[in-house]
Image: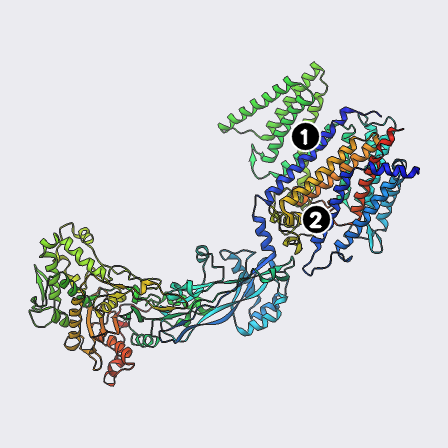
Amino acid sequence: MRKDYNLEKRKYIIGGFILLITIVYIIRLFSLQVADNKYKDYADSNAFLRRTQYPSRGLIYDRNDNLVVYNQPAYDVMMIPRDVHEFDTLDLCNILSITREQFDQRINEMKSRRGYSKYTPQKFVTHLSAEDYGRLQEKIYRFPGFYTQKRILRQYNYTAAANVLGNIREVSQGDIDNDNYYQSGDYCGDLGIEKSYEKYLRGIKGQEILIRDVHGRIQGRYNDGAHDIAPVSGKNLKISIDIELQKYAESLMVNKIGAVVAIEPETGEILALVSSPTYDPRLLVGRQRGKNYLALRKDKYLPLFDRALMATYPPGSTFKTSQGAILREEGIVNLATTYPCAGGFRSGGLKVGCHAHESPITLKPALRTSCNAYFCWGLKSLIDNHMTKYGSHANAFEVWKNHLVSMGFGYKLGIDMPSESRGFLPNAKYYDKIYGVGRWSANTIISIAIGQGEVLATPLQIANLSATIANRGWFITPHVVKEIQDTVISSDYTEKRYPTINSKYYEEIAEGMRMAVTGGTCRLANLESIEVCGKTGTAQNPHGRDHSAFMGFAPYHNPKIAVCVYVQNAGFGATFGVPIGSLVIEKYLTGKIAPERKHIEQRMLESNTIIYSGVKKH
Amino acid sequence: MELRSTNQSTFGNIDWVTVIIYTIMVFSGVVCIYTASYDFDGASIFSFDEFSGKQMLWAGLSFVLGMFLLLIDARLYETYAYPIYAGIILLLIITIFIAPDVKGSHSWLVFGPVSLQPAEFAKFATALALGKMFSTYGFSIKNNVGNLFKAMLLFMMPIVIIIMQNETGSALVYLSLFLMLYREGMSGLILFSALCAVTYFVVALKFTETMVMGIPSGEFAVFILIMVIMVGLIWVYCKQHSLARNIALGYMASGIIVFILWLFDISINGYIYFISIISLASIYCFLHMLRTHASRLITAIVFAFLSIGFLFSVNYAFQHVLQDHQRNRILITLGTIEDPQGVGYNVNQSIIAIGSGGFAGKGFLNGTQTKLKYVPEQHTDFIFCTIGEEYGFIGSTLTLLLFLILILRIITIAERQPTAFGRVYAYCVASYFIIHFVINIGMVIGICPVIGIPLPFFSYGGSSLWGFTFLLFILLRIDASRREHHSY
């Protein structure tokens, strides 16, 4: 048969067809293999089981090397839902000591959790007891898709310092979104230094890469473990807290609302940071954490609220020390300047009361007697009488305010804890807004001179003022962590900060404070063995009885401790502030309470001022 | 002496390009099977207990077989084409009754440790028989429906028997012989219609989510296609350019009117619109035909109405005839529904394996998808995954190009045959390779539905390897002696 050349052309159609298909396939391959990277991840998630190895969390020691917080292993039962095959549910329930209903409930809860995925490990049971863990481990091969994950729980050697230490909690979805270090089921620090030093304490997670076949069987380690990462333990912390002192101060504050802050002036290290009422840190460990945490949250006395750092109180008369220093620095008064006080400060129909003492009076005796009139006259002189120097009330006020800011008021001090309040210091604009520009003068705002009115400070800020006076003119930002293992502590906590007041004026203030102890409002703090300096505070407040405050340091020369005590609604500063403050000082410096002062200690331990707080328990 | 000189000329005329491609493919195949069945226990490639060991043996023997086939006088293939065909058909029938049940299929003959699948050998037998039929003096299928049906009967026989063996995939392979029939004179309209049918089917079922003019968008698209193809047929096939232009303009005008009505919130049902507008166009065609006697126009009209009928019957069959699992299978293949764990699992894992290979691949024995057995059937039907994963885009593309070259080479060989027997046989071989290549690769990369047929020379299995060796080396032998015919 002859060739049909018309038909022979059809070879091009057939050839073209197969060429076209080949091109389409190559394009498809290109889109799968080159243009799209997701398949690599899919293949990896098929083949590689990345098992996290958790580092042990850093331990926490106190300043005297007492172990405060340590770790205890616990085991979580994890499951990867897509790897779970048929298994004996009842057997598993028996081992885990749960009922079938609880089992189903857990599965349902797990599925409704935010961030649930069939492909990632999900927490099934938390904190298995060592006994249950042992039994489960023997049979775990029968439950494909399930495995145990070692976790750590925090344990506490002391019931004290819960507010400083904080605790750990399971991460939220928000934590996971913000920090890719975390995976569902991990723990992170909550409150206290567990939170602020989280990055040091948590260490670095390790990872073991296992090869898993289609049946979920482990075929060994990937590249013989060449890509495995060993976990790095978290760094140990040494906190500046003296845990015994902390415990003692907490015991003195039982049944009182308030705070005690003790600072080592020379270093800015916080020796005790008490917020009362407090709680046992052990409540927030393990399976009961959720329930207990909720109870603490609901408690009307707000035990989770760290009053030492976050409560803002009128500083009351403790503030007069700062006022004295400003008046001296600005040359408003000298040591011989006297102001009259006949039962108080009277000016233009305004009256601020005072108690009986000599009149007229100079600076140091004014500190000793806590004379209201002296400091009111002083502030009035600063703001009203020096128009040539400052130009206006507002300018004069700004000078006043800036001195206080340099002392650490009005802004956060920068403590190494997760939350701190800045207190409140008004500025000229603030008053301009309330009273109108140029329509206010010293009389309008006079109560700030004695730590009342708009001025608010945290116990930490008051303690820091005390430390500054103790140092005669400088302070180091207060902090609770003294040392971090293998790490140099931030220079923020080693550098001196100088307020804008000459050192010699602080010396005068210290002298006034010493006089207050030897023959003034703080006589109860007059210890035989130690020269204590102090200043009481009695702050009026809208919530009921006055707040009782004390600020002091000791010894007078070369001070080792500066304290602030603030007891809400406890009356005069001398009744609670002074005794508690002096007991803390005595305990710290001598290690004991002198027998003749035991009765004071007893009274403080037993007294209850919480009943005056106006907070009804339920 | 006579024999030797024949042999010398035979070997001198062998198409070495094909032999080299064959050798590369068989060797690569063994390597891939070794990779695919490699375990972390690390068994030896030479162990005959392993797939790769067995395949090596089969590969070695296939070269011997190839040599043997080259030694046989080419004329014998033509002479004994029908007896060989008859013998194989008989063997296929016997197989149904004596073959053990392997997952419902009765296609394997077991001889001790060796199993053979006669269906693989029916391919070359059918090709020989077809060649023989077409070489009959005066035999042509061009404009001869009777001859066309005779030729179809030859390959419908194995199809029916293999379907009875429950090997539907293998049976479908024979449908590729329509390509050969097309080359030999079958109307291109038949292939074109088949192509249209597949396109309509896919488009209509794939896009059912959104509605346009009150009908699913897929069906809307099919109607548009029908209109375009109708105009195309009138232009290209009927060569009635002005008529085509008029109808196209009419379609467009009607579309604009519908659009304007839609702007005024008057919507027309899609079915009513399309059927009436296509009917109007058909009437216009018909009148034109009566006037000009352009009889080919009837094809365009019939085409349009057959298309509409096909669309409605697909819809009906899909909704009312198919069962749920069959419907699902089709929808998964079309990508309308996803099913990573069930029917779609194989393909899903296969795509992951290939996709994860990236540009240059993970390297020899480094594929995790295949090593850890995530891809089922990876040493047989899904062997291409191994190439994709371990040799990446480069390796995959080279493999595709190798197949393309082989197929084009076979077409070249086919066209240089002096006899209809040689040409038809060669086109049968090309058709088989085309369908195996297109379906297997298409399935593995998720374009075609999952039809279990092997990738020639790569997939594990002695029968498949030997079957294709028979096909190729008989072709080479026939080709080598093409000049002898001239000497007659």
Spatial CA span between label 1 and label 2:
38 Å
A169 vs B324, nearest the viewer: A169
Side of B107 where A132 appears, left or right = left
Mark 1: amino acid = Ser
Residue name at image x 72 percent, y 28 percent: B189
Tell me which corner region of the image, top left, top right, bottom left or bottom right, holds residue A608.
Answer: bottom left
Single out the mark in the foreground, 1 or 2.
2
* Residue A545 percent coordinates (x, y): 21, 69
Residue B307 - label? 1
- In the rendered image, the quadrant that contains the N terminus of chain A is top right
Mark 1 vs 2, N-terminal side: 1
**Up-down: is A562 above or below B129?**
below
User: Label 1 is found on which chain of the structure?
Assistant: B
Q: Quadrant of residue A597?
A: bottom left
Q: Are marks 1 and 2 on the same chain?
A: yes
* Residue A539 visible to an observer of this rendering: no
| Badge 1: residue crowd in 10 Å (few <14, some 14–19, many ≥20) | many
* Horizontal side of residue A281 vs B102, given as left or right: left
Residue extending furthest toward the bottom: A595
Which sits in the foreground, A595 or A414? Answer: A414
In which quarter of the view is residue B304 placed? top right
Residue B137 position within the rendered picture, expressed as x and y whole percent measured from the top left = 88, 27
Image quadrant holding the C terminus of chain A, namely bottom left
Q: Which label belongs to residue B383? A: 2
Q: Vertical placement of A24 versus A216: above or below?
A: above
Instruction: Name the secondary structure under disc 1.
Output: helix
Tell me: A149 left or right of A616: right
